Each structure stands twice: as C-alpha cells, then as structure tokens.
Amino acid sequence: MSKPADKKPGGPAKPKVMPGYMNFLIGGTSGMMAITCVQPADLLKTRMQLLGPAGRNTSVFTVANDIVKKEGVMGFYVGLSAALFRQATYTTGRLGVFNGLFDYHKGHWGQPTFPTKIVIGMVAGGIGAFIGTPAEVALIRMTADGRLPPEKKRNYKNVFNALSRITTEEGVTTLWKGGAATVSRAMVVNGAQLGSYAQAREMLLPAMGDGLPLHTVAAMISGFVTSVASLPVDIVKTRVQNASKGVQITQMSVLRDVIKNEGVLALWSGLLPTYCKIGPMTVLIFIFLEQLNKLYFKYVA
C-alpha cells in the first residue's frame, strides 16, 4: 500500500511505497486481531449452516441458547486457535497479495477501476484461500464438534492437533478437502469485500475525508455486499468440508441437494449471524489495517 510523501524541493512528490513483506505482515496481523472479537458470531454461523433441513426454522437465538446450555459461554470460542491460524495464513495471503497488486497497478497504469479492483480481489482471495485451506478444514471441524453426539466427536485439542490427526488418520490430501469450494468462496468474498471497500473508500473520501468514520462506513458497505454475495458458496463449502470420512461429495451435488430439499432461500441461511460476523469483521480488519499502515508510515518509513 502506498502513501503520499512530502514534496521534495524542486520536484514533485514521490509516493512512499510499503515493502511487499509488510503488506503481508500487517494484513495477517489485522485479521488475527479482528477474529478474536467476532469468533462467537463465526461459530454461530457455522453451526446454523450445518443444521440442514431439520433446522430450517431454527433461529440464531435458539442455536446460541443451545450452545450456552451444553458447552457454556466458552463454547462460543471453540476453534479459536484454528481461527487465528486461518487468519495467519489466509488473511496474510489475501491482503498482502491485494495490496501488492493494487500498488503495482497504480504505479504502472494509475488508479484501478472498480471492475479491476474486483478482479484483483478475486485473484488475491484465490491465492490466500489455497494457502489457508488446511486451517479452514480444521476450523470447520472444530466449530462443528459441539453439535455432534459424543461417539462422533473428534475432540481436537487445538489446531495443530487437528492438522496432525487429520494427516495421520485421513491422509495429507484431506487438508485440502473442499479446496475448490474454499477457493471459489474466497474469490467471491474477496472480489466483493476488497473491491467494494476500495471503491466505497475512494467515492466517500472527498466528502468524509480520510479517517476512522470513512473507514467504518466503507467497511460496513463492504460487509453487506460481501455477506449477500458469499453466503451461498459459503454454505456449500461448509457442508463439503464437514462431510464424514470417506464420503465424496461435490459442490454441485451439495448445491442441488440444498435447493431441492431446503429451497433456494436456504442458500442464505444464517444471513444475520453471517453479517454479524462479516460486518464487524470487515470493519475491524480495515480499521486495524489502516491504523497499522499509519503507524508504519509514521514510525518506520
């Protein structure tokens, strides 16, 4: 990510450009900071997506109450280690690649158009998702464990225990189970999230000026767009990754089954907890990202 520099005497200002590795480091750090705040909503979203036809009319409040009764308040933080590891891999990759490509385009061809921002976001999301798929598989399984009967619980101790057991018990390729679904979702999510945030920020900047209110409003717009666009592929991805050992299902078969057995609107099941997670998550990620960028350019660059 680049920032304007002071003008040099006798010449035009030359923008400061953040080193590539800092884009990755700051991106991952902002994601890890954000997920610690919204993990309960993420767990609720996953549990609702796994309810299937039987839970079609189950409310988010019913699911939340069930978690408290059976697992206690700390049940909302089951899988936090996997969530943090996912941010350390997936978000580090996607934000680092996005900011790197954005700066490259801006330096060679000028400010990217909105369609270009979406494409850059999709490319960044696909790369980040491939890197983060093992953590994603562990996260889905750990957050789903609480709703399983005792004899079917996997009882992973933490993300590293989950990755180790999945590798030894089911083979290393299982770590990329649902990889295509994860990459597909990530391309949609990041095309919508990063593209819409950058566009909203650019459009609102003249009226609001650069600062926390701008970052918050742009991020909330981005979070809504992302929630609506990504939820159908998110539901498909979740069900593919949570399938039992030895069960082979495809994205298309899951999609057909959901529409046939639960109706088209089931593709947006859990929209409220999804936005309750993605909205604040988007706000927090970009607020942390912008503030860390400012600190870098103030004290390091």
Image (spheres, grey):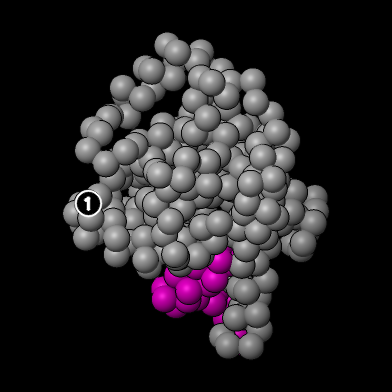
- Of the pair 199 and 83, the residue shown nearer to us: 83
Residue drawn where x is 25% and y is 34% of the image: 247
Q: Position of residue 102 (x, y in %)?
A: 46, 58
Q: Position of residue 103 (x, y in %)?
A: 46, 63
Q: Residues within 10 Å of mark 1 (few under 14, many from 20)?
A: few
SS at badge 1: helix
Vertical position of residue 295 compared to residue 202: above or below: below
Evaluate whether residue 226 shows in this view. no
Where does the magenta region start and end?
A: 6-32
Residue drawn where x is 58% and y is 47% of the image: 43
* Residue 90 falls left or right of residue 293: left
- Of the pair 76 and 108, the residue shown nearer to us: 76
Quadrant, the C terminus: bottom right
Q: Position of residue 75 (x, y in %)?
A: 62, 54
Q: Does the magenta portion include 206?
A: no
Residue drawn where x is 69% and y is 29% of the image: 59
Residue extending furthest toward the front: 151
Residue drawn where x is 50% and y is 15% of the image: 262
Residue designated by label 1: 170
Q: Position of residue 31 (x, y in %)?
A: 55, 63
Q: Does the magenta portion include 18?
A: yes
Vertical position of residue 187 compared to residue 72: above or below: above
Q: Given the image, on which type of amino acid does mark 1 rest?
A: Glu
Count of numbered labels shown in the rendering:
1
Evaluate whether residue 220 shows in this view. yes
Occupied quadrant, residue 135: bottom left
- Of the pair 72 and 295, the residue shown nearer to us: 72
Vertical position of residue 259 compared to residue 148: above or below: above
* Residue 49 falls left or right of residue 164: right
